[in-house]
Amino acid sequence: MALQCGIVGLPNVGKSTIFNALTKSSVPAENYPFCTIDPHLGIVELPDFRLKKLAEIYKPDKVTPVTIEFTDIAGLVSGANNGEGLGNRFLGQIRQVSAIIHVVRCFKDSNIIHVEEQVDAVRDAELIETELLLADIETIQNRQFKIDKVAKSGDKKAKIELDVVTRLLEHCNNGRRARTFKTHGEESDIIHSLHLLTQKPILYVANVDDTEITHNNRGEMEQQLIDFAEKEGNIAIRLCGKLEQEITVLPEDEKGVFLEEYNLPEPGLHKLIQAGFRLLNLETFFTGGPKEVRAWTIKHGSTAPEAAGEIHGDLQRGFIKAEVFKYNDLVRLGSEKAVKDAGLAKLHGRDYLVKNGDCIYFHFNV
């Protein structure tokens, strides 16, 4: 399953700095707008302590974690929907991702240019949200125009779609995001086919200065952004992009000392990666053996055959049973054999909903 998160925000808010820290890249992060033009891609491993524990049990030749693809998208500005700052090009890049990581500057520094001349976290967040909404309204209007002609010919399916699109347009014209539009049944498929920007889940990242991190203080702008995110039905986390980039380049044996100095239990980027994963409503299951221990990604609520299909289509087509070992049982007892001997390995059929952390052996026949 392709996991794609796009990093967006106004110019000079720290997007490229955070992207570099995430992906250990060297994308230019200069003090002027539109330093980033073309999108930069990076593959990042999902931090998961369970993989290490399972590797100690199976002693495999190979360990394969879940990965997430992050895209550093150039800064949007007011008027992007009308082409300002190459806006149409950048909006098109956002359409390609599954979720949006919206970096918002929550620190003041007179040495770093701000395109709106002064920092205001909520205003900056609303600017981006407005541009995404305006782009969606244009998309919906275009679809309404096209489907209206078909509906007038008497096509029943087109009439249903026209009704949904018309109600959605009114919803968005009232300043509300597509993700808050209530749908049922086939209406969801109609909305999904539009690939709307404001339908994508958003994680707000408050980029704060290192003094807030050091003293564990929550600044006024950060709190305002958190309140704004909650009002929009989203979540916000905080980190210091500059600090995270410093941590990334340190040797492994020095990172612990650095984190302790700043009173951090782990790099803030771990929190960002894991939050991005949850944002997509995803869970992890594992397969294990002497050749490989591997983490796999599924949507929350996936059935056992659907999970098998993430490994290979033949496993889904020929699915018979899923033999499930609970992670905690494996770690506590130390082997699959011990779990079986304790009567804790369970065979499940096609209706079983895979749980986060399940270790599964699939029985199949094709």
Image (spheres, helix red, strand yellow):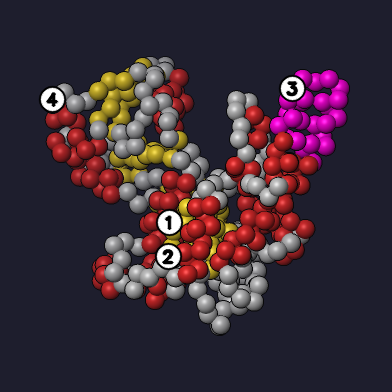
* Residue 201 vertical position relative to residue 186 in the rendered view, above or below: below
User: Distance between the Cα atoms at labels 1 and 4?
Assistant: 40 Å
Q: Earlier in the sequence, mark 4 or mark 2?
A: 2
User: Distance between the Cα atoms at labels 3 and 4?
Assistant: 57 Å
The segment highlighted magenta reads 142-166
User: Callout 4: helix, strand or loop?
Assistant: helix
User: Distance between the Cα atoms at labels 3 and 2?
Assistant: 48 Å
Q: Earlier in the sequence, mark 3 or mark 2?
A: 3
Give the labeled residue for mark 1: 272
* Near-viewer residue (304 or 117): 117
Give the labeled residue for mark 2: 239
Residue 185 inside the magenta-drawn segment:
no
User: Mark 4 packing: few (<14 Cα in 10 Å), some, or many (20+)?
Assistant: few
**Dots 1 and 3: beta carbons under 8 Å?**
no
Q: Is residue 26 visible?
A: no
Q: Earlier in the sequence, mark 1 or mark 3?
A: 3
Figure quadrant of residue 265? bottom left
Mark linked to residue 157: 3
